[in-house]
Image (tube, rainbow, N blue to C red):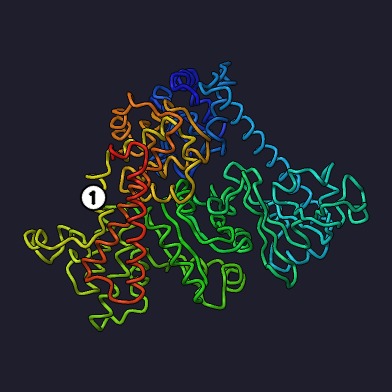
Amino acid sequence: MIPPAFLQDLLNRVDIAEVVGRSVTLKKSGANLSGLCPFHAEKSPSFTVSPTKQFYHCFGCGAHGDAIGFLVEQHGMSFIDAVQELAGQVGMTVPEDRTTPQEREQAAAQKQRRASLSEVLARAAEHYRRQLRGNQRAVAYLKGRGLTGEIAARFGLGYAHDGKHGLASAFPAYDDPLLEESGLVIVKDGDDAAPGPHPDADAAPATAPRRYDRFRDRIMFPIRSVQGDVIGFGGRVLDRGEPKYLNSPETPVFVKGRELYGLYEARTAMRERGHALVVEGYMDVVALAQSGFGNAVATLGTACTPDHVQKLFRFTESVVFSFDGDAAGRRAAGRALEAALPHATDTRTIRFLFLPEEHDPDTYVRECGADAFEEQIARAVPLSRQLIQLAADGCDLDSAEGRARLVAQARPLIARLPPGVLRGQIVAQLAETARIAPSELGETPPATSGGAGPAARDRAPSREPRRSRRPLATMASSLDRAVWMLVQRSELWERLGHDAHDLLSDQPPPYGDFFAWLDRIVHDQGTLAAGALLDEMSDAAAPEAFGALAARVRQFHDMPVGDEAHVEMGVILDRLRLQLVGGELELMLESGGAQSDEARTRQRELYRQQAELKKRLATAPGAAAH
């Protein structure tokens, strides 16, 4: 919502050397300044600041950007906050945006609502910390788990006592609606006590409906956003009880599928160690940090999602997933693999660590030591090997039937990989394991590999679903239009929902990369004006392909994006879904049709979806144009 011209004027007035110099000791080095990079550990300076170009760059870790980007990355500010901080320093006023008064009012109300929830959660976190200091039983529990007061303070650990209305002493009004909306208090119909600002919470008079604290007699783990704001909690029972872990419900500031516990605390350690370590529990994160592995984060009671992986790759190019070695850990690894595949580019490293069945990271590092855990990380399985192992699960590779099943199970995994050398290498390994030519997997083998020559490959029928083979030929115009609509009206992204987000982010480059990038921008900065988004797409820090995409979608500049844009977006999404269904049907038919009851059921369901989508598209506004 900030005009690009203002941003350029701001950057022209700001001295990047002064901005960076507040955090980094800089020394003159020719025409530039140099110092130790704040984004990764180094002994000799590879971090350079150019006062003339107003840019910083690290030749060690690749970090680069302008003064705004430095405040965002180094201090965890949002884009808007960084702009306002710099504008205040040079005496500039951030201009009003060009949205309608109603849109500004709605945005302000939403921002105020989120700020109010964050304030309530921060106040609760401080209350829980005070409760921990005064409860010897809770302190003894943490000491028994090997944690020091220093590490407890670093992660802001607290304690919720076992009273039903413990938070009543922390807030002026226990019936404040924000307590319910933030997930701290549960409200149900009834006549149990619901105290107001009473000093003795459990002795307060009864009213209806009844209210009580969600978290009781639990060690409290504050969940922070990347900016450091408390957005939710995880609570662990001290003794026996169910559930063992209890999480905050989703709220306007907390979405489990997008947040990672410990990410705020782990950002610097990720850069220093060169990778992120993803574990399954809050205590694993804290225990590993206690033992020197400050780069650990955990999912919040959910399976790993593509959003989690995408967020991690903002801070590192290498991710290690750590799981227990039991059946549940193997299943969790499979879900993490599927979430990571769309982000497995040639420059990134994704590995899988399986501990002995009797251990989780917390118990392993305490019983075996940090050096032993470091060795486990070094032996982590690369994504390529884990993919083949997952595809081969339940397959007798000594039989033709088993190898055919391997191929069938591998195809949907391969389809999720972005094009590149890594994908080609994995296909070649799979083909060798299955004793087939890479073309049987719907892929062209790498030029350096053996196998069929070009003529034979040209004659081989493609086995890949249409969605992976044809989108640039048949859907480019629609996807370009979708990009243009979302650039012009980025608030549409928030209206689409997670299913649509996944569908769009799963498209081939550059489209899938753009939609994933847009999701991060909207999540971190809120909705932006078209000019600002186009400027960011063309920025040097954005993926190279975005510049060409930005230039191409400008062909739609004469086509207005009106109030019915969500209807047009729905049509585009249905066309993508139809393409997806058609690709799966084609693959099924090319493979000999449905051979089992399960396959026949799936085939019938696909035909039903196909008919429904065609009917919906035929009756959609402007159907003749489609």
Q: Please report the residue visible at 73 percent of the width from the left and 48 percent of the height from the top.
A: 180
In percent of width and height, residue 421 lies at 25, 55
Q: Residue furthest left?
A: 455
- Under mark 1, the amino acid is Arg
Q: Nearer the viewer, residue 104 or 444?
A: 104
Q: Please report the residue visible at 23 percent of the width from the left and 50 percent of the height from the top.
A: 470
Q: What element carries label 1?
A: loop
**Residue 29 seen in the figure:** no
**Residue 414 seen in the figure:** yes
Question: In the rendered image, which quarter contains the C terminus?
Answer: top left
In percent of width and height, residue 85 lies at 58, 26
In percent of width and height, residue 354 lies at 47, 71
| Residue 54, placed above or below residue 578 | above
Q: Which of 50 and 356 is in front in this view?
A: 356
In the figure, is residue 191 to the left or right of 69?
A: right
Q: Which residue in the structure is indicated by mark 1?
A: 470
| Residue 34, placed above or below residue 324 | above
| Residue 575, placed above or below residue 113 | below
